[in-house]
Image: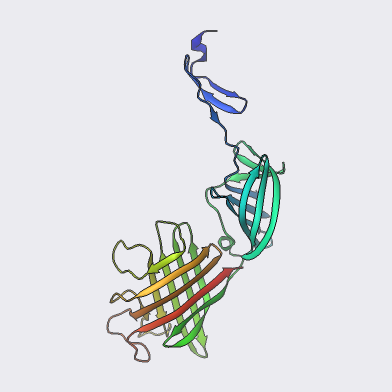
């Protein structure tokens, strides 16, 4: 057989993919056998299991019963021992847990198989239980307003850990009176991480914090106090964050959103102090 008959041929030998021309050394490219990545096992409209085996040795998992409308999450660390995948569970549905799970794994045609039957397909991004919307954010949002502690019920939470953004909206009702607290931080383009965010009303600012306090959300004559005018001070310290858990402290001075307006009681600013957040999605 002549040399030309081999030119440009693709060879698959013993699990290795090689491409070579005549007279050239054949580079050997091993096929990956690591389970690292983001995987999903889908059973139609019945259930989904998503598993993120991260490069830093940590894992997160979300198991959802689509027909029953329930979701459970777990996280911890992972490693392999030969053909065995070991998961060390440290958190289960936002509560401490402990235990080791063992699975025999193999990568076949780009899919992850566990224990020879469960086949996980690769996906682009990980999900959380909050993405499915089967539960609620619970916990506490409170702050001192004019020296009096106010407790706000969680009205809405938006967490984008990959996009670096977080927003928390709360409402407080005392008798016929109602007030609103809105908090927003932006660490983009980096992923959301613990640290300090400050009020910075300048173009191109990074790690910014926005705060709004409205003592009478239904008012037609007052727009509320926030941090967009007169360069007020404000700090938001994020101490823990995940798609299903946020803890933080904050304080800020807020001025009228519209120049010349005053609060319902004649106030010209609102001083928010000793703010605390500890919320989870369940």
Residue 67 sits in which quadrant? bottom right
- Report the side of 181 relative to 51 (left or right): left
Q: Nearer the viewer, residue 54 or 151?
A: 54
Observer able to see residue 102: yes
Q: Residue at x 43, y 72 (%)?
A: 183
Write the residue at 49% across / 84% down.
Answer: 150
Q: Residue at x 49, y 19 (%)?
A: 25
As drawn, the residue found furthest toward the front would be: 81
In this view, 46 is above or below 186 = above
Q: Residue at x 57, y 33 (%)?
A: 31
Where is residue 219? Give x, y as percent: 40, 85
Q: Left or right: where does residue 108 sit relative to residue 213?
A: right
Quadrant the N terminus occupies: top right
Q: Is residue 201 above or below residue 145?
A: above
Furthest toward the top, the residue is 1
User: x, y (%) of residue 99?
Assistant: 70, 57
Q: Is residue 124 above or below residue 224?
A: above
Total marks placed: 0
Q: Position of residue 149 (x, y in %)?
A: 48, 85
Scheme by which the image is coloured: rainbow
Q: Is residue 45 visible?
A: no
- Quarter of the figure that contains the C terminus: bottom right
Looking at the picture, how far across and down is residue 70, in whole percent? 66, 63
């Amino acid at each position: 057989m002549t040399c030309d008959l081999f030119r440009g041929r693709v060879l698959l030998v013993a699990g290795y993919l090689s491409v070579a021309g005549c007279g050239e050394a054949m580079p050997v490219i091993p096929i990956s056998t690591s389970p690292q990545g983001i995987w999903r096992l889908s059973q139609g409209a019945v259930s989904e299991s998503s598993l993120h085996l991260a490069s830093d040795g940590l894992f997160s998992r979300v198991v959802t019963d689509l027909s029953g409308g329930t979701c459970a999450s777990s996280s911890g660390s992972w490693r392999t021992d030969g053909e065995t995948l070991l998961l060390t569970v440290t958190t289960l549905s936002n509560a401490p847990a402990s235990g080791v799970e063992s699975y025999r794994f193999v990568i076949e045609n780009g899919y992850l198989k566990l224990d020879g039957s469960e086949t996980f397909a690769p996906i682009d991004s990980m999900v959380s239980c909050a993405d499915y919307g089967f539960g609620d954010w619970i916990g506490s949002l409170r702050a001192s307003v004019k020296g009096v502690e106010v407790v706000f019920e969680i009205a809405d939470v938006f967490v984008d850990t990959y996009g670096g953004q977080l927003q928390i909206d709360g409402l407080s009702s005392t008798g016929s009176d109602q007030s609103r607290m809105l908090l927003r931080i932006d660490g983009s383009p980096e992923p959301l991480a613990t640290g300090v965010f400050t009020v910075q009303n300048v173009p191109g600012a990074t790690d910014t914090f926005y705060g709004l306090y409205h003592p009478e959300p239904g008012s037609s004559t007052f727009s509320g106090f926030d941090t967009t005018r007169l360069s007020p001070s404000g700090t938001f310290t994020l101490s823990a964050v995940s798609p299903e858990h946020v803890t933080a402290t904050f304080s800020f001075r807020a001025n009228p959103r519209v120049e010349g307006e005053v609060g319902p009681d004649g106030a010209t600013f609102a001083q928010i102090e000793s703010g605390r957040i500890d919320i989870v999605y369940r």
